[in-house]
Image (tube, helix red, strand yellow):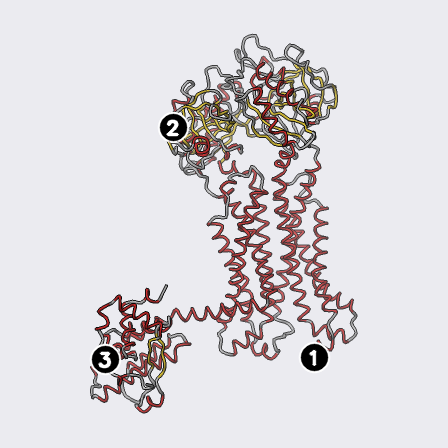
Amino acid sequence: MRQRPFKPHLWLIAAVSLIVPRRFREGWRREWEAELRHRENLLLRWHRLGPKSTVELLRRTLGSFMDALWLQPRRLEEEMFQDLRYGVRMLLKSPFFTAVAVTTLALGIGANTAIFSVVYTVLFRPLPFESPEQLVVIWETVLARGNVEGTPSPPDFREWRARAKSFEGMAAFYNASYNLSGAGEPERLPGAIVSADLFQMLGVKAAVGRTFLPSEEQFGAHRVVVLSHGLWQRCFGADERLVGQSITLNDQPHTVVGIAPKGFGFEDFAAGGDDAELWTPMAFAPGDRYDTRGNHFLRVVARLKPGLTVAQAQAELDVVTGQIAQEVKENSGIGARVVPLREELVGGYRTALLVLLGAVGFVLLIACANVANLLLARTSARRREFAIRTALGASRLRVVRQLLTESLMLGAIGGALGLLLAWWGVKLLLTLGPSDLPRAAEIGVDGRALAFTLVLSVATGVVFGLLPALHTFNFDLGGSLKEGGRALSAGRRAGLLRRGLVVTEVAMSLVLLVGAGLLAASFWRLLKVDPGFNPEKLLTAQISLPESRYPRTSPQQAQAFYSQLVERLEVLPGVRSAGGSTALPLAAGGWGKMLSIEGRPPAVSMESVPVVQYRQVTPGYFSTLGVPLLKGRFFTERDAGEAPPVALVNEEMARRFFAGEDPLGKRMWMGPPENLLPPGALPPGFKFPLLTIVGVVKDVKHLGLSQQPGPEVYIPHLQGLQETQRGMFVAVRTDGDPLSLAAALRREVAAIDKDQPVADVSTMEQRLAASLSPARFNMLLLGVFAGVALLLAAVGLYGVIAYAVEQRTHEIGVRVALGAQRKDVLGLIVGQGMRLALLGVGLGLAASFGLTRLMSSLLYGVEATNPETYASVALLLIFVALLACYVPARRATKIDPIHALRFE
Amino acid sequence: MSPLTSLSYSAAVVLQAVSSGYVYGFDIMDVTGLPSGTVYPALRRMEQTGLVASSWEDEAAAQREGRPARKYYEVTDEGREVLAEALKRYRHMERLLPEASRKTGPATE
């Protein structure tokens, strides 16, 4: 029929059929042709076959294009399902390979996602304030004290705020605690006293009511409070009518003006302290001694004007502080430093988190290298299969796609398992993590981490799928078929690639092991540090007496409270002794005070007056904590009121100020030389009490085990200064479990003052554990990563050697047949593996040398280049590598030459 | 999703045509007036979802007429159920198509 002269519809069908998926093409064409020919026949029979009907036929034929288009998705679908089905079959066929590959990926991806979730939230997620990038923290610096960052005084803050033009707003605050009473059990709440514009400057609006008015910064108008959302819900049932009503804080009525929005917590960011539960405006009574240039305690946050940089603001503040220093004698040498808020918040954790992120990235790279290696080995083993498929008509693209599908499946399964691991890992991280990790409450596996995992798993799948896929292009297909798929060398390049991957793996795991080893050595050293006291069986708690009932003007009341409390505690059953101090090791507290020593040349300027740590303690404090006396005597009950003022100093103080002399009997006062003070700075008739040193005690690591203690002065609390009298820590040495006495402690406090809450009850061992938790956290995590990396590298090495043994079966058979001994074969195989391992170790040592410097700030008592750590880690790795090579090598020795030769 | 919910009006008409004995693509176009670009995709979709099944007519019979064998479609059991449901929805549809004469049926019958 094809000889008929003009049949454009049949040509059209033939043309359109080209885009029909190959699987349907034949049937599709036959169906259309049969219909068209049948119609032609009918028209012919009816004598209707003219140009008009031909055009009509052609019009109908045009629809075939729609038909062919509609079949397009099935092309992909079908082949994809084929790929997937085939992929599943192949993965199930070698369950060991699949299990190792999936586990490897899951570990890498899971650890990465978990760490990424934490790191992203802590370091990178925008702070929950309006335009957070404009927010900065401003510290005071004092030239004479090495310009370390300190806090400014209220008058200085007001000068900065008034004069500096680089800022849209500047606010100050300081931490305070409040006793909430009048409704049930009294409660002590962490809070902050803030300048009125703090909320406005941060761009935070009250959830209910309002925040502070500028007028409320005036003394007298300041008895107002903003409550946190949490406190409002917990204690006041989220009652909106609370706004406008009065509550009792520190025995004073305060009007609630507003409720902060949910989740607002500023002090947690800026001060690293507890989440504030309430805020009151900052106002000083006229003549308040806090409101002087000598009292430095404010924290300052500010918002840069849009477009201004931190450096520009810094330059302006330098000018402003310079001007103030010229006008005010006390301020000479005092400057200011502008630090971006984000930097301030996470600064301390940046190194640790970035080291962990880097480490975990290494783990993922090792994981990928391992899977790539596994796939390369498998691809080589499957050359015959691919050759057959290609010979049967599969395009190379199709084979590559099949491989990619398998890789993506591995990536997807690994990714899914990894996400599960990550979810669990984040929970674990938060449990193990340091208690003061910034923004910990916001951390969770979030959408971003999920996206990160997906991208990772897909990219991993593509990367390690592509390597073997590209490799298949280099096939000599005929050769593969002829060789029977058991090539003597499965491509020199592939072999080189695989050996390179193993060397990289070994090198990277060595870097991780060195890092973990250094952290472990640091931690070990920290544990062995003598804290200067005995932390066992010690219960501690914090008490803050309110100004209203224990006024500064009559310090005897607060003194009596603590004396009575210690007496009551000491007679409790199960208590050995009790004591109190204004500062406890590893807890907050402590004041810095200026020091002048009798008979020494007086300081020439205010900023050259030395500052030492100052604590007031009860007589039994040292024996309760177990702080050894090195010289002289402890305080007694007689060191009170009218008795001659006495002091104890720590070793560091004796070393620094009384080198080569006996400090006992020396006299000093806690203040500057009087001639440096402006006239009228001291109340009329006031003289600093002259303290006589009666003893020297051992250094106590107050700030943490890794921190060297500075000079410290202890004063008996019955001779203490007025303003430091009301807040104290109590410590109780017990016979049994210290926490079992917590209830009794609260009871005794309530027996003296029923409205007095007790805060921060914990054992000294808990405080010690908390202080070690950042170091423990880093060590554990890096240790786990290094362990995983070691395992993965061992698996990788094992894989390469096992594969080599398989490939060299014939060669080994020949050698054995020619008389090679068992140890020769063993040496041959192990030697091949160990060359790779040693090369990796060498590269790893060099890399570690460069990389571990980055983590030197995390180390304690160990250099980043500590040779013992390097050597032991290298030995460990070599040992594991030997093991990984030995197992397949042993198999090689069991090769039966007859069997091996028959293979050919 | 049941096939019913995805059965468009045109697909229902095509199904009704097949059920009424118009079993070849071009005959379906003739009786429904739908273009080939609608009829064929509808048939493919319904074949994929199992509402119709296709077979080739007897090769010998076709050759006697000097043309290749044609493909014809039949309504499956599931297709009949779906059609019954569709007829409830599109009530007027049943009267739309004339009953085909047995002669136009597939040559295998």
**Same chain for the residues at labels 2 and 3, yes or no?**
yes
Residue at the bottom extreme of this rendering: B64
Q: Position of residue A892 (x, y in %)?
A: 72, 69
Chain letter of mark 3 equals: A
Looking at the image, which is closer to me, A653 or A474?
A653
Res A243 label: 2
Q: Are marks 1 and 2 in contact (CB under 8 Å)?
A: no
Disc number lying in front (1 or 2): 2
Chain letter of mark 1 equals: A
Quadrant holding the C terminus of chain A? bottom right
Type of amino acid at the residue the image marks with label 1: Arg
The residue where tag 1 is placed is A902
The CA span between labels 1 and 2 is 93 Å
Chain letter of mark 2 equals: A
Residue at the top extreme of this rendering: A685
Q: Position of residue A353 (x, y in %)?
A: 56, 44
| Residue depicted at x 46% and y 69% | A81
Mark 3 element type? helix
Instruction: Tell me which numbered mark, 2 or 3, is placed earlier along the sequence.
Output: 3
Type of amino acid at the residue the image marks with label 3: Val
Mark 2 element type? loop
Instruction: Using residue A478 as the reference point, say whether residue A621 is left or right of it.
Output: right
Quadrant holding the N terminus of chain A? bottom left
The residue where tag 3 is placed is A55
The CA span between labels 1 and 3 is 71 Å
Instruction: Tell me which numbered mark, 1 or 2, is placed earlier along the sequence.
Output: 2
